[in-house]
């Protein structure tokens, strides 16, 4: 009954768990993917891009709040999460100043100009990634692994070429810094689940819906290797567990979380199978973020005594 009567705006913090504690645990959960990405792309000095982008996000928040005479909130770790997530969504060869530009856009434009933490209408890190994709398409789609440039496994899959799913699980592939190792991502995801930070309904529904969609429309039926390659390739796992579950930009109702996951799965499938790019997770999450007010409107339980027959 308490859950049904709660109609205030998200995020909702229960018990003694604070926003800063939640954000800190998200940072901890991102460490396996971050450490692996830095090691995996050590020849490209990925650690520099990760460090500079994260620092730029924190500094942007501090400077903006200082200039606007607002309370300084960098201790809540939300800017760290935004900067780190953005860095993990960037190619390791991207110039550091582009990472800084993306971090400033994420914090100032997407987050602070809409009121700060809890008021942004889309995931700041993904908003910044799409901004960089529009401005620097060539650099954002330039991938290197072990000193050799080439297409990502997802692009090869879209072109009908064979891919090595074991390499995709481990992370020995081209891609963005944080998306390559599914194992590292899942270690962090399991930590968040065990700590009760994220709700399984969103990533679970997202992944199941996506699998159903590509099974029906992908042209390969229940081909296990094809499905596994789609799940392990690109940013689906990182997006499903760490960005689609963002408290601020995801629904709070039980039905809303499921409907939100369905939207994510269908949109990702549409973009991957029929779009011009091999990837589509970022766009799917942002569009679904924009649909959240409508999703909550149609799934919010009606107040007792209303909505019945007269």
Image (cartoon, rainbow, N blue to C red):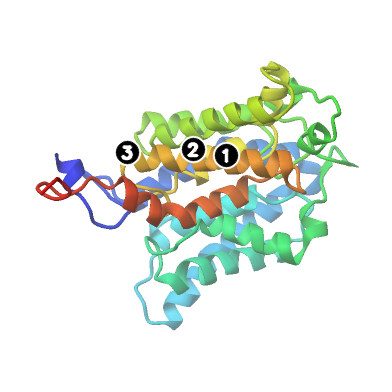
Which residue, as the protein is rendered here, is positioned at the far front? 310
- Which residue bears the numbered disc 1? 266
| Left or right of 195 in this view: 62 | right
- Where residue 234 sits, quadrant-wise, is top right
Q: Position of residue 268 (x, y in %)?
A: 62, 41
Numbered label attached to residue 262: 2
Q: Is residue 292 above or below residue 37?
A: below
How dense is the environment of label 3, judged by Cα within 10 Å: few (below 14), some, or many (20 and up)?
Answer: some
Numbered label attached to residue 254: 3
Q: Are marks 2 and 3 in contact (CB under 8 Å)?
A: no
Measuring 76% from the left and 36% from the top, which residue is drawn there?
A: 154
Q: Are marks 2 and 1 in contact (CB under 8 Å)?
A: yes
| Inter-mark Cα distance, 2 to 1 | 6 Å
- Where residue 120 sits, quadrant-wise, is bottom left
Q: On the rendered image, what quadrant is the N terminus found in?
A: top left
- SS at badge 1: helix
Q: Nearer the viewer, residue 158 or 21?
A: 158
For marks 2 and 3 on the same chain, the one whose residue lies earlier in the sequence: 3
Q: Position of residue 164 (x, y in %)?
A: 79, 23
Q: Nearer the viewer, residue 150 or 67?
A: 150
């Amino acid at each position: 009954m308490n859950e049904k009567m709660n109609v205030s705006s998200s995020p909702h913090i229960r018990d003694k768990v604070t926003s800063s504690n939640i954000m800190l645990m998200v940072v901890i959960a991102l460490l396996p993917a971050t450490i692996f990405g830095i090691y995996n792309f050590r020849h490209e000095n990925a650690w520099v891009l990760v460090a500079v982008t994260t620092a730029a996000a924190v500094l942007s928040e501090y400077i903006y709040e200082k200039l606007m005479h607002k309370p300084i909130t960098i201790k809540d770790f939300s800017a760290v999460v935004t900067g780190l997530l953005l860095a993990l969504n960037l190619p390791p060869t991207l110039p550091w100043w582009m990472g800084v530009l993306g971090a400033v856009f994420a914090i100032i434009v997407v987050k602070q100009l809409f009121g700060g933490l809890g008021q942004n209408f889309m995931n700041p890190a993904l908003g910044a990634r799409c901004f960089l994709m529009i401005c620097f398409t060539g650099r954002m789609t330039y991938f290197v692994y072990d000193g050799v440039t080439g297409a990502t496994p997802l692009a090869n899959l879209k072109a009908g070429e064979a891919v090595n799913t074991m390499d995709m699980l481990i992370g020995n592939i081209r891609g963005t810094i944080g998306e390559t190792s599914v194992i590292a991502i899942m270690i962090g995801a399991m930590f968040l689940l065990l700590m009760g930070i994220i709700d399984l309904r969103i990533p679970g529904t997202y992944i199941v819906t996506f699998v159903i969609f590509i099974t029906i429309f992908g042209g390969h039926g229940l081909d296990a290797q094809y499905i596994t390659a789609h799940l392990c390739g690109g940013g689906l796992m990182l997006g499903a567990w760490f960005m689609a579950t963002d408290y601020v930009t995801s629904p709070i109702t039980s039905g809303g979380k499921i409907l939100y996951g369905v939207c994510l799965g269908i949109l990702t499938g549409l973009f991957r199978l029929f779009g011009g790019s091999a990837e589509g997770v970022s766009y799917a999450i942002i569009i679904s973020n924009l649909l959240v007010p409508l999703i909550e409107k149609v799934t919010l339980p009606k107040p007792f005594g209303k909505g019945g027959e007269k």
